[in-house]
Amino acid sequence: MNRLLARRFAGNSCLVRVPWRSFCDAAAVNSGTAQAKHAEKQRLTSHSEEYDVAIVGGGMVGMAVACSLASMSLTKHLNVAIIDSNPALVNGITIKKEDPPDPRVSTVTPATISLFKEIGAWEYVQQHRHAYFDKMQVWDYTGLGYTRYNARDVSKEVLGCVVENKVLQSSLLSCIQNADIRKTVFPARLTSMNLNPSSIPTELNGTSSTSPWRGFARLELSDGTCIHAKLVVGADGSKSNVRELSGFKTTGWNYAQNAIICTVEHTVENNCAWQRFLPSGPIAVLPIGENFSNIVWTMSPNESSELKSLTESDFIKSVNHALDYGYGPHPKSSSARDGDLSWFGAGLTSSAGEGFTVPPRVVRLASERMVFPLSLKHANSYVAKHVALVGDAAHTVHPLAGQGVNLGFGDAFALSRVIGEGIAVGSDIGEVSLLRRYEAERRPANIVMMAILDGFQKVYSIDFGPLNIVRAAAFNAANYFSPLKRNIISYASGEQRLPLFT
């Protein structure tokens, strides 16, 4: 009898913790049973923290989900819980204009910018440091080919905008704080989760009854709080606790590469994004405002350890060497104006006539050097009953094109839109049949981008003469064949169209 009751009430202990010990006489057993029934009755009738959506992870993608829900008329009435132990969610983020840019930045695409404008978050970004860029140059260390992209090629004003992660996070926090939506921040970690608490029977006044939490997931937090939610959104990063507790399997691998990131300073303002493919991985230089740029340099773990330990002077020399004549010659520029490329026809883009340019020299290291291991990971499924994964919890990608955070933002806005569509027709927002619509939209798009980035990583991990020639030919085709070039720019800008000859 004791064991039966212990099992019965163990699953409901998050709200009322009932002390338990063995009794040896019938009177004590009856007393314990009555006490347990009374505690269960109190649990059923007492106030419970109940939410429509519980977002686990208050980073950029998790906050984007909250802001998107707050911005739509169909979802702004929802009661939302945000679970994250980061004190910045409660205390705010301090951003000092006089400080140099933080090395942790994101390159947001025009599509992402449009989504931020729709939810009212971009106006907060514009109050802080950010850098639009309308040109990009990509070239190979062999000197055999290069490509230049210009926003004018696709009749756009910009190719993207580089923003510090803390600025994006602060802007989303400001947006949700000013939004007309019921939200509660729990400064704690998720410790356990039951996606089907209705499977635990209850007994009240001698009769069996169904759990009052049918249709809810139960979450226990590190501070002892227990909440229930119709939908749990896993936005808690590449080591997602939600993903693990939900039993989602993943596919992926670690790259034998690390990325060094840091902020550097030039003597002139940089307004172009640069990327050079080196034998051990790409190095990117991204404008971040004023005379500052962000460096993302991919290399082997041994090389990253060596470069991180260099003096500032030697590190700057290494960066300039990698961006100039190091590893190979400059590509030879072709001039469309001189008629050399007339055989491509009259449809050349404006940037096809622009010659190769050396990036501005780095003169100072303006931040610490940070090193991150690189990997690819993809959840085999994004959704289950009462749960959906977004951002790095669902997928992590190689940073060579800066697309990771944009994929996450795409997830966030797609999921909130599907939630709104479900509410419009009276569906349960935790039903897997509804959530599958989100997965059907985002998973194929993410897989395509992951495959493209992984393909680039593998192709440029091999230094082989004939392959180098093929790569150079691909660079030149992308530079001078306007339909392909326009399509690549449009796809990289966030348009859902494959980068093919269309």
Image: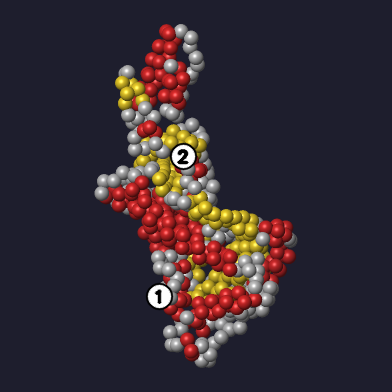
From the top left corner, tell me how far across and down residue 256 is, in percent: 64, 58
Q: Badge 1: few (under 14), some or many (20 or more) residues near its Cα, within 10 Å? A: few
Viewer-proximal residue, 282 or 119? Answer: 282
Residue bearing mark 2: 186
Query: Residue 53: x and y, percent?
Result: 38, 43
The residue tagged 1 is 502
Q: Is 449 positioned to the left or the right of 333 in the image?
A: left
Above or below, 482 relative to 343: above
Secondary structure of the residue carrying numbered label 1? loop
Disc 2 element: strand
Instruction: Determine whether, in the image, residue 230 is placed left or right of residue 221.
Output: left
* Residue in the image at 72% along x and 58% along y: 309
- Residue 88 appears in view: no
> Which of the pair 368/428 is nearer the observer?
428
- The kind of residue tagged 1 is Thr
Q: Residue furthest front?
A: 466
x 33%, y 48%: residue: 433
Q: Tell me which amino acid carries mark 2.
A: Phe
- Please identify the residue farthest to the left as the structure is shown: 425
Query: Mark 2: few, some, or many residues within 10 Å (few <14, many ≥20)?
Result: many
Residue beneath the point at 46% across and 8% down:
25
Q: Is residue 358 above or below residue 207?
A: below
- Looking at the rendering, which quadrant does residue 355 occupy? bottom right
Measuring from the top left, give residue 437's x and y in whole percent: 35, 53
- Which mark sits nearer the N-terminus, 2 or 1? 2
Which is more toward the observer, 341 or 70?
Answer: 341
The C terminus: image quadrant? bottom left
The alpha-carbon separation of the residues under discs 2 and 1 comes to: 48 Å
- Name the residue rendered at 45%, 17% in the picture: 2
